Amino acid sequence: MRVILFGATGMVGRGVLHECLLDPEIETALSIGRTATGQKHEKLREIVRPDLFHYTDVEEQLSGYDACFFCLGVSSIGMKETDYRHVTYDLTLAAGEVLARLDPGMTFIYVSGTGTDSSERGRSMWARVKGATENALLRLPLRAAYMFRPGAIQPMHGEKPKARLMRAFYVLVAPLIPLLLRVFPKYVTTTERIGRAMIEVAKHGAPKKVLETQDINELARTIAP
C-alpha cells in the first residue's frame, strides 16, 4: 500500500507517520508539507513546498496512491472565520480535489475533532468550518472518505504540538492523560491509536464514515502492536 500524509510534522501527523513506517504492508509513505520531517527511512518520500493550495507542478508525483491521511490543521484561537476557513476548508479541499482526480480509487481520511458540527449552522465557528470541510470531502468522487474526530490525545513517541500555546497546555496536562485514557476511553485516545486506526480503515474500511474517539480506539485494537 502507498499512502500520502499531510501534516507529518505536527503532533498527530508525526504519530501517524511513525505507524506508517512500522507497518509492513505500507511500502511508500509520501509526506507533503511546508517543512521537512527531519526523518530518514527507506519508505519515506517527501515533497516540501510553501504553497499547499496548488499542486499543478507536482501532480505527476501524486498518482498511484491508495490512501491519504490528512492531519494538517491549525488552531482557530484568535482567528476570524474567513481566515480560518481559508486555511482549513480551502486548503484541505485543494488537496482533496486534486487527489480525487488523480487517484479516484483512494481512501481519504481527515482528522477534524470531537464536537465538529455536521449541520454547519452551530454557534462554534471552528466546528462549523470543520463540519463544512468534512461534508465537502464526503462528496468527493473517491472510493471512500472517512472523518476522524479524536478528543483528548496522548502523544506516545515524543510528538509535540507545533503551536506554542498547545505545547504549554500539553506540558500541564500530560501527567493526567494516561489516567484519563483509562477512566474515560470514550473521550481520550493516543497518537499511536490514531495512526493504527487510520491504517486499518485504509486497508479494510469502517462501518461508518464519521469516527469518534471510541471508534478510533476500537479500530486501533484490531492491529497488533
Image (tube, helix red, strand yellow):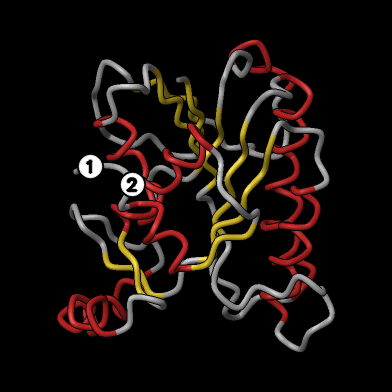
Q: Which amino acid does label 1 sit on?
A: Ala
> Circle 1 sits in a helix, a strand or a loop, which is it?
loop
Examine the image and state in which quarter residue 102 appears.
top right
Seen as rendered, the residue at the extreme left is 175
Q: Looking at the picture, how far across and down is residue 178, in whole percent? A: 18, 75
The quadrant of the picture occupied by the C terminus is top left
Seen as rendered, the residue at the extreme bottom is 123
| Relative horizontal placement of residue 52, taking residue 188 as reference (left or right) | right
User: What crowding class fits label 2: few (fewer than 14 Cα within 10 Å), some (14-19), or many (20 or more)?
Assistant: few
**Cα–Cα gap, marks 1 and 2:** 6 Å
Asked if residue 186 is positioned above or below residue 100 in the image, the reply reads below
The residue at 37%/17% (across/down) is 27
> Circle 2 is placed at which residue position?
222
Seen as rendered, the residue at the extreme top is 60
The residue at 32%/56% (across/down) is 191
> Circle 1 is placed at which residue position?
224
The residue at 57%/37% (across/down) is 50
> Circle 2 sits in a helix, a strand or a loop, which is it?
loop
Q: Looking at the picture, how far across and down is residue 144, in whole percent? A: 68, 38
| Relative horizontal placement of residue 113, taking residue 12 as reference (left or right) | right
